[in-house]
Amino acid sequence: MTETTAATLSPQVKKAMLALVVGGIAAILDSTMVTLAIHTLVVKLHSTAGTIQWVTTGFLLAMAVAIPVTGWAERRWGGKRLWMAALLLFALASVLCAVAWDDTSLIGFRALQGFSAGLIFPLLQTLAVRAAGGRVTSRLMAALSLPIALGPILGPVIGGVILNWLSWRWLFLVNVPVIAVGLVLAWRFLPADRPEPASGRARPDWIGLALLTPALTGILLGLSELSEDGGIGHAGVLVPLLAGIALLTAFIAWALRPGGRPAIVDVRLLRLRSLGTASAVLFTAGAAMYAGMFLLPLYYQQLRGESVLDAGLLLIPQGVGALAARFMVGRLVDRFGARAVTIAGFLLAAAATVPFALAGPGTNLWWLAAVLLARGVGIGAVLIPPMSVAYQDIQPAGIPHATMNTRIVQQVGASFGTAIVAVALQSLLAHGTTGAFQGAFWWAIGITVIAVIPALALPTGNRPDAQSTQTDKTARQEEAV
C-alpha cells in the first residue's frame, strides 16, 4: 500500500481490505492455476483433453450462475455472513477437488468451487465499497484490485511450481490454509452488517433469475466452444450462443419493464454514464487481459518448448509490472483523470504486445521480459480507473447491483477475448506454429486497441476522490475542534 493510499484509508477500512484481499486471493489464484494442469489431469485421471477441459468450463459456468444471486443473498443474510459462508464453501469444494477419484467427480467439485467463487468475486468489491462508506476512490480500487490484477499472472507461476514438485492435488489443498486465515480476518475486521429489515420476507426475482442464469451460461458455453472444429457455425457453439443472447434480450426487457420492482440485477443503472461507460471499458479490459494471458503461456510452452514451471517463471515480469502500476495509478488518476490513464494503459499494453507478434522460437528472452514488464504496467493500469468511476453516481442500495453489472461484463469480456484469440490460433496453425502465434498476437493487439473506443467516454476527472478529500479535510477540522 502506498503512503498516499495509507493516508487516505482509515485504519478500519485498511483492516477490512486486508480481510477481503486475503480471503479472496485463493479463489482468484485458483481460477488461473488450474489452466496449467490440463495435460497433467488428462494423464493422471486417464481422461481426454476434451473432457478435462470441462474442469475449467464448468467452473466458469457455475460462477456465472452464482453472480446474479449475490445481491439478493447479501440483502437476505448480510454481507459478512455471506462472505464467510462463501469462503467456507470454497474451502470445502477445494478439499473435494483434491480427493477427486476420476474426471467426472473433479468436474462436479470444480462446479461447486465455481459457484462459491461466483459469490466471492462480487462480494469482494461490494464489501470493500461498503467498508469505505461508499466513498470510492482510485486508491481504494488500487488496493482492492491487487489480487484481481495479479491473479492471472501469479497463478501460472504458483501452479507451475506445484506441478513441477508436488501432486496436482496440491493445486486445491493450497487454498485451505489461505482461506482459514481469511475467515479469521473476516470475523475480526469486517464490519458487522445485518440484513435489510424487509429482506426476510423478500423473494428473489425468480423470473429474472430464470432468464439471466441460462443466458450467461449459454453465452459463456458458446464462447468456450468457439475454437472447436466448425467454429461459429458448429451446433455446439451456435445453439448455446444464440439461446443465451435471446434469453439475455428477454431478461433486459423484463428488467426494464415499467412499474415493476427491480430485477435480480438492476440493468437500469447502466443508464448512468459512470456505470455504463465503466462497464463497457471493463468488458474490453477483460477481453484484452485474458486474450494475452491465454496466448503467453502457450507461446513459451508450445513454440519455445519451455516446461510448465519455466513458462510460469517467465511470466513474472508481467506480474511485477502490474504491481508497479498499482502503486502509481491512484496518483495518476488524481492528476490526469480516469479517461487519460485508461487510454494510456490500453495503448501501452497494445504496444508491449507487438514484440510477441513479431517473435519466433529464438527471440531473446531478456527482451521479451522487458516488454512483459511494460505490458503488466499497461494491463494493471486499465482496471483501476473504470472500477473507481463505476460507483460515482450509485446510491448505497445500488452498490450490489453495480458490482454484479461490472462482474458480469468482465466475465463475458474475458471469455470473449479468449475465444477470439483461440479461434485465430487454431485457424492459423495450418500455416505453421510460428505464424499462428504471431497472427493470434496481432488479434490480441487489435482487441486492446479497440478497447480505447469505450474508454474515450469515461469521465475526464475522478469526482469521488475530490469528494473524499473534502470529507477528510472536514473530518480533520472537526477533530481539531
Image (tube, helix red, strand yellow):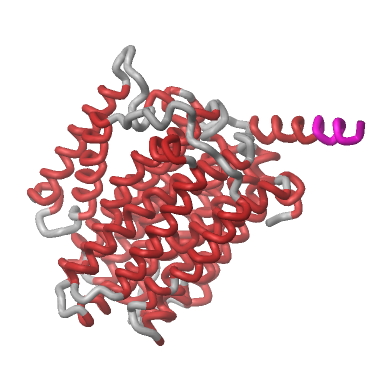
162 up-or-down from 296: above or below: below
Q: Is residue 395 magenta?
A: no
**Magenta span of residues:** 473-481
**Residue 106 occupies which quadrant of the picture?**
bottom left
Q: Nearer the viewer, residue 418 or 192?
A: 192
Prevailing secondary structure of the magenta residues:
helix
In the picture provided, is 40 more to the left or to the right than 328?
Answer: left
Q: Nearer the viewer, residue 343 or 24?
A: 24
Q: For the view shown, which residue lies furthest in the bottom direction?
A: 165
**Residue 200 occupies which quadrant of the picture?**
top left
In the picture provided, is 227 more to the left or to the right than 188?
Answer: left
The residue sitting at 32% across, 13% down in the picture is 258
The residue sitting at 44% across, 57% down in the picture is 87
Quadrant including the N terminus: bottom right
The residue sitting at 32% across, 30% down in the picture is 203
Q: For the view shown, which residue lies furthest in the right direction?
A: 481
Q: Position of residue 240 (x, y in %)?
A: 15, 44
Q: Position of residue 105 (x, y in %)?
A: 20, 68
The residue sitting at 44% across, 35% down in the picture is 75
Instruction: Please indicate, yes or no, whether residue 78 appears anywhere in the rendered image.
Output: yes
Quadrant including the C terminus: top right
Instruction: Please indicate, yes or no, whether residue 343 appears anywhere in the rendered image.
Output: no
Q: Nearer the viewer, residue 49 or 356?
A: 49
Q: Position of residue 277 (x, y in %)?
A: 46, 32
Q: Position of residue 127 (x, y in %)?
A: 54, 43
210 up-or-down from 156: above or below: above
